[in-house]
Amino acid sequence: MKLEQKIKNLAYEVGFDLVGIANLKTSQYKAKVKNWVKNEFHGQMHWFKENLDRRLEPRKNLFGRAVSAITVGLLYRPVDIPPELANDPSRGLIARYAWYDDYHKIMTKMLKELAQKVDQLINKKWQYHIYIDTGPVLEREVGSHGGLGFFGKNTTLINTTLGSYFFLGEIICDIKLSPDPVNNNQGTCGKCRRCQDKCPTQAFVEPYQLDARRCISYLTIEHSGEIPIPLRKLMKNWIYGCDVCQEVCPWNKRAKNLFAKQLKIHKDLIAPPLAELILMTEDDFNVRFARSPIKRIGWSKWMRNILIACGNWADRTLVKQLNYYARHQDKVIAKTALWARKNL
Ligand code: B12
Ligand code: SF4
Ligand code: SF4
């Protein structure tokens, strides 16, 4: 059996749902990525500009010795949100990926295990680096080069069997591996434009091009400070991330019977009641989300998002809590609570 196939078998053994081998090369979409930054579509994600050269030229990794990537996907598709909950404005919606413990930790552990197994297999000195999400890597592009999927107009990487509800990670290394054919998994969006039409904030400037500053995922997770007033109503009851452009995608509808095997859902995060969330103190937050990706945004952003959803729900029973937050020492929370109270 070829080395590449053995590595893939090891990755499946560790529990990944997708694995591919990619040669590292200069980003095919270099000009588009540079334009994205030039147009300020990254908003406050200033870290995206740092190491931009390395993002666009992944061979610069490992002090210029990086040549290949073992790229992996971990399916996180859970059950669908029951429509009576999803359409209930008194509930807060959390993106599916955050219904589990933090995937960065889970995948780091899995990729370390895979690296150890590869180490035993090749039995020679090699250099590698594990990346999951936060490294300066265009993960979807590397994933597409490993044949894991194709770029959807919603900018996610879509696998023709599994859809797009999967995380990406990779081991970038200095051993030359034979790559999988890029077109291993080439579906297409065809004439479909559902994600563009259904995006609540119209965040797509054009197909394959997202203005993150309008995206609810960016606004609720990455954006610090007050959220621009015109966007608040459009956010409806999304309080952490957003899944709309994936929910409407036919490739995900087609894959609806495939579920995450490796991850355990925290069912209390499926559309929890806003009336309960608004009572959450900073201590409650730190305890409840100790192992969750939600922890990263901190209580202050979390409460800001909940207050916006409360403003959109506009239920009079909230008045006491909104009055309380309107006097809060955190100015963003106080101003957002005032805005929400005006909506009652
Ligand atoms: C920054 C970032 C965000 C930003 C910006 C998103 C974006 N579209 O760029 C925000 C905060 C909005 C975000 C949101 C989400 N994210 Co995010 N994010 C990232 C991160 C860190 C970098 C992405 C990036 O490089 N953007 C730069 C821009 C320029 O990329 P782009 O516009 O997509 O362009 C690329 C391609 O589309 C292609 N391209 C450009 N033009 C064209 C034209 C054509 C015709 C074609 C074919 C291709 C093409 O080339 C570019 C370079 O690869 C990656 C992790 C990583 N290190 O890669 C995760 C990542 C992309 N995010 C992920 C997830 C899960 C999400 C959310 C679903 C979370 C949620 N539910 O709230 C949403 C989805 C929103 C969306 N529609 O993209 C996953 C995606 C997995 C997958 N199957 O695709 C990643 C890979 C994290 C991970 N390790 O799993 N994210
Ligand atoms: S995640 Fe939501 S807001 Fe962002 S592009 Fe997709 S549908 Fe639009
Ligand atoms: S909703 Fe349609 S256009 Fe958007 S990514 Fe899915 S198939 Fe492509």
Image: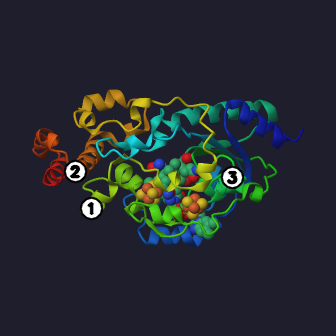
For label 2, the crowd category at 10 Å Cα-Cα, with few meaning under 14, some 14 to 19 and many 20 or more, is many
In the rendered structure, which amino acid carries the disc numbered 2? Gly
Q: Is residue 177 left or right of residue 227?
A: right
Give the vertical position of 249 relative to 38 (above or below). above
Left or right: 109 as drawn, with respect to 280: right
Name the residue nearer the viewer: 309 or 287: 309
Residue 52, image x, y percentages: 52, 61
Residue at image x 32%, y 30%? Answer: 286
Q: For this view, does 235 lie left or right of residue 48?
A: left
Q: Image quadrant of ligand 3?
A: bottom right
How much space separates mark 2 and mark 3, taking CA atoms? 39 Å
| Residue located 27% across and 44% down the image | 306
Q: Which residue is mark 1?
A: 228
**Residue receiving disc 3:** 160
Q: Nearer the viewer, residue 31 or 215?
A: 215
C-alpha gap between disc 3 and disc 1: 37 Å
The three-letter code of the residue at mark 1 reads Pro
Q: CA distance from mark 2 to mark 1?
A: 14 Å
Residue at the limit of the structure toward the right, as seen here: 1
Secondary structure beneath dot 1 equals loop
Which residue is label 2 attached to?
311
Q: Position of residue 145 (x, y in %)?
A: 71, 57
Circle 2 — which element?
Answer: helix
Q: Earlier in the sequence, mark 3 or mark 1?
A: 3
Camera-near label (3 vs 1) is 3
